[in-house]
Image (cartoon, grey):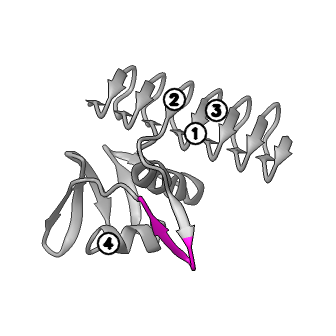
């Protein structure tokens, strides 16, 4: 790990820049606040999350988040659907959660247990919520690619490019 507050905690993993986390074998996080939790995954740019094996999330975020007196300003709010009192969709993608609303998820990412059928560990939960609120890219599926700003590649072998697009 090179830079400030970076973590490379798995075999042959690398983290460069500011506040990046690379937690799976042969994964790379490069830039600012990126997380690579899938084996051989890459998260490059700012506020991107790569969860799937061989997944890549690259690009910038759409929201400029500023913290003042412990409050986050400029946070993006994704579209949320609630059924039976819990969040069941985020930006149109099926999720499993115990959260009752977006603020509940922001304050406790552990309440997001899966997205598009992909189970999330604690590191991925926090990173997915961060990417959602910052408008970063998220590559969830195996060999998926999310490139641009605010994109989600939710299925295996899916690719999405541009702004605010979803591949399921």
As drawn, which residue projects farthest toward the bottom?
69
On the image, numbered disc 1 is attached to which residue? Answer: 46
Query: Local crowd at mark 3 within 10 Å, few (<14), some, or many (≥20)?
Result: many
Q: Residue at x 64, y 32 (%)?
A: 39
Measuring from the top left, give residue 138's x and y in whole percent: 44, 38
Query: Local crowd at mark 4 within 10 Å, few (<14), some, or many (≥20)?
Result: many
The quadrant holding residue 24 is top right
Q: Any mark on residue 59, and which? A: 2
On the image, numbered disc 4 is attached to which residue? Answer: 99
Q: Residue at x 41, y 41 (%)?
A: 62
For the magenta stretch, what is the residue range?
68-74
Q: In the image, which is nearer the foreground, mark 2 or mark 4?
A: 2
Going from N to C along the chain, the mark reached first, 3 or 2, is: 3
Distance, label 4 to label 3, CA atoms, is 28 Å
On the image, numbered disc 3 is attached to which residue? Answer: 39
Horizontal relation, residue 5 to residue 116: left or right: right
Residue 9: in magenta span: no
Going from N to C along the chain, the mark reached first, 3 or 1, is: 3
Distance, label 4 to label 1, CA atoms, is 26 Å
């Amino acid at each position: 790990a090179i830079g400030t507050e970076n973590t490379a905690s798995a075999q042959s993993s690398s983290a460069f820049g500011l506040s990046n986390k690379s937690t799976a074998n042969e994964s790379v996080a490069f830039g600012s606040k990126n997380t690579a939790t899938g084996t051989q995954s890459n998260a490059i740019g700012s506020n991107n999350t790569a969860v799937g094996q061989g997944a890549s999330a690259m690009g910038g975020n759409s929201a400029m988040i500023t913290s003042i007196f412990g409050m986050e300003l400029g946070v993006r709010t994704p579209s949320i659907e609630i059924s039976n009192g819990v969040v069941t969709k985020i930006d149109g993608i099926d999720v499993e959660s115990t959260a009752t609303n977006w603020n509940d998820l922001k304050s406790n990412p552990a309440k997001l247990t899966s997205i598009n059928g992909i189970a999330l560990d604690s590191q991925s939960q926090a990173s997915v919520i961060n990417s959602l609120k910052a408008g970063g890219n998220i590559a969830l599926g195996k060999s998926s690619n999310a490139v641009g700003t605010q994109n989600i590649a939710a299925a295996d072998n899916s690719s999405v490019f541009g702004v605010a697009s979803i591949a399921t």
